[in-house]
């Protein structure tokens, strides 16, 4: 990818979990905490939580990621009505938080190295507290420009969110690499704008099949592989 001069990164599911969908991260902690629900009911709780967070201003701009997790799992507990005790609630939160810390030991190093060679922009569906989360995990210096859905009022898969990222980089779309974990939300809209793409295909919410006329330029299994292709 010799023509790449700038990079747009997704955050959730990409930098923080290295390709693993957040539902799978939380489900693993449910199992470790001994929450007695099957995966179908868990998925219902997960969807309830995400839809509630999208509709209501529950996450404040000052909230850390740890606080975000507390509020997110509280919504699961509300939906599941007594199946998540306070002790299990806390175990899920701490397990998820540790997963992010462990993953960032690898992904942060990759982002740091790439930031020395390319300008980076973050384009993310998030809750309005992305700057606080980046500071919490010592990532702020790598992303001087952030395009966050809750702030600009546009959500993926709308290509307009990525168009703002392209504008922030100030480069032609064909010179920008978009890195994300979702084909439908990251890769497909970016391709429609003419960007180059790298799809981190990890443990996902549901199987995604690329369209024949909209194939990712690269499919990778982890963010570390970017160092081999750039």
Image (cartoon, rainbow, N blue to C red):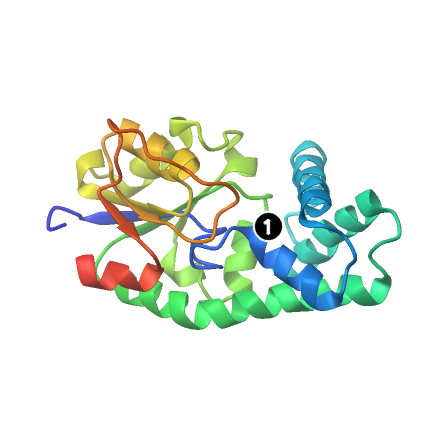
Q: Looking at the image, which residue is at 23% across and 31% down?
A: 194
Query: Is 110 in front, or is 131?
Result: 110
Quadrant in the picture for the C terminus: bottom left
Q: Looking at the image, which residue is at 50% across and 51% down?
A: 12
Mark 1 lies on residue? 23
Direction right: furthest residue = 82
Q: Looking at the image, which residue is at 18% across and 36% down?
A: 174
Q: Answer yes or no: is residue 172 visible.
A: no
Query: Is 39 in front, or is 150?
Result: 39
Query: Is 191 in front, or is 40?
Result: 40
Q: Is residue 176 left or right of residue 180?
A: left
Numbered-mark total: 1
Q: Answer yes or no: is residue 89 visible.
A: yes
User: Residue 8 at x, y = what percent?
Assistant: 33, 46
Q: Is residue 201 left or right of residue 228?
A: right
Q: Looking at the image, which residue is at 65% across and 40% down?
A: 50
Q: Is residue 199 left or right of residue 229?
A: right
Direction left: furthest residue = 2
């Amino acid at each position: 990818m010799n023509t790449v001069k700038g990079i747009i990164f997704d955050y959730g599911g990409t930098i923080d979990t290295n390709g693993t969908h957040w539902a799978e991260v939380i489900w693993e902690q449910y199992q470790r905490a001994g929450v007695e629900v099957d995966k179908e009911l868990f998925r219902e709780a997960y969807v309830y939580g995400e839809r509630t967070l999208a509709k209501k201003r529950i996450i404040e701009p000052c909230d850390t990621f740890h606080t975000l997790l507390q509020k997110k799992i509280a919504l699961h507990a509300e939906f599941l009505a007594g199946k998540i005790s306070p002790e299990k609630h806390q175990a899920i939160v701490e397990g998820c938080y540790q997963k992010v810390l462990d993953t960032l030991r690898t992904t942060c190093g990759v982002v740091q190295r790439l930031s020395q060679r390319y300008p980076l922009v973050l384009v993310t569906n998030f809750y309005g507290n992305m700057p606080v989360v980046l500071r919490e995990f010592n990532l702020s210096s790598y992303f001087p420009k952030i395009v966050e859905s809750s702030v600009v009022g546009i959500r993926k898969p709308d290509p307009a969110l990525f168009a703002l990222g392209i504008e922030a980089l100030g480069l032609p779309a064909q010179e920008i690499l978009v890195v994300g974990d979702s084909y439908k939300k990251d890769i497909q809209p970016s391709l429609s704008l003419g960007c180059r793409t790298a799809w981190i295909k990890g443990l996902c919410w549901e199987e995604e099949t690329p369209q024949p006329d909209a194939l990712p330029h690269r499919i990778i299994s982890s963010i570390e592989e970017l160092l081999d292709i750039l």
